[in-house]
Amino acid sequence: MKLEIASPYAVSFSCKRYHYAKAVPIAQVSYSVFNDLDEFCGVVVYGPGATPNLSSPYNKWHGQVLELVRMALNGKQHTTSMVLGASLKALKKDAPLVDLVVSYADSDQSHLGVIYQATNWIYTGLFNAGTRGAFMINGKKTHNKTVHSKGVIQSLSEVRKHLDPNATEFFTKGKHKYLMPLNKKMRKKILPLSQPYPKKKSNIDKNDNENI
C-alpha cells in the first residue's frame, strides 16, 4: 500500500464517486491511496470540519485539531483500518503541529464507529441527538446550508413557502464522537473523557468500515 498527497481533483472525484454524501468537504491534508497493484483506491481527507470551535474544547488553537472528514474508498484497498492507520502516521509527519484528530460516526446512517473501535480511538459519546439536522424537501434530505444557499430562511414555514409545500423537518439521531490523540501529552489530557464504546445490536453497522 502507498499513500501520496492527493490532488484537489482526486479528492473531488473520490468524494463524489465513492462516498454516500456525494459532497466535497474542505480539505487541509489529503492522501490518495494505492494498493500493492498500484491501483487507485480513493482518498483520506483531514480538514477543519463543519464545527467552528473544533479546537476550543481541548484548549488548542485553530489548526492543532483536525477532523477526519472523509474516507472515500472504492473497496480495492487492503483493509480500511490499515489505510486509516497509515494516513494517521503520514499526518503526524506532514502536519507536526496537529495534536488531535476528531471523527464522527453518523447514527442516521446506522453507523456506530466500528473502525474507530478496532483502531483504539477514544469514544466520548453521542452528540446532537434529537436536533433538527435538515429538511425533507421533495422527498430528499436537504441540509440547512443547502437551504441557506438557495436564499431561503432555515425555517419550516419558509421552506414550505418557497421550496416544497409538503416539506418536513428531519431530526437527527446524533453522531458518535471519537478522538485520536497524536502524542502522549494529548492522550493523557483527553483520556478522562473516555466512555464505553457503543455496541452493535444487529448487523446494521456492517458498512461502517467502508466510507466515512
Image (cartoon, rainbow, N blue to C red):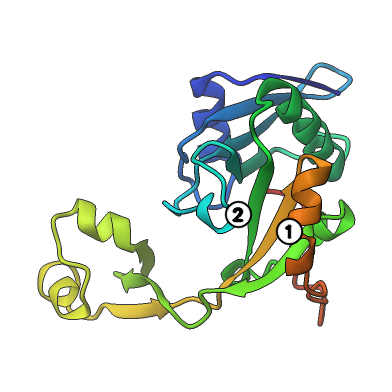
**Does residue 175 appear to the left or right of 180 in the view shown?**
left
Give residue 180's position: percent from left, percent from top: 75, 49
**Does residue 97 appear to the left or right of 189 in the view shown?**
left
Q: What residue does disc 2 label?
A: 58
Q: What residue does disc 1 label?
A: 190
Calculate the distance from the C-alpha at mark 2 to the C-alpha at mark 1.
8 Å
Which amino acid is tagged 1? Ile
Q: Picture quarter containing residue 109?
A: bottom right
Number of other residues with Cα within 10 Å of mark 1, as a class: few under 14, some 14 to 19, many 20 or more = some
Q: Residue at x 69, y 38 (%)?
A: 73
Quick one: SS at disc 2?
helix
Number of other residues with Cα within 10 Å of mark 2, as a class: few under 14, some 14 to 19, many 20 or more = some
**Does residue 152 appear to the left or right of 46 in the view shown?**
left
Instruction: State if disc 1 and disc 2 touch (CB < 8 Å).
Output: yes
Q: How many marks?
A: 2
Camera-nearest residue between 52 and 10: 52
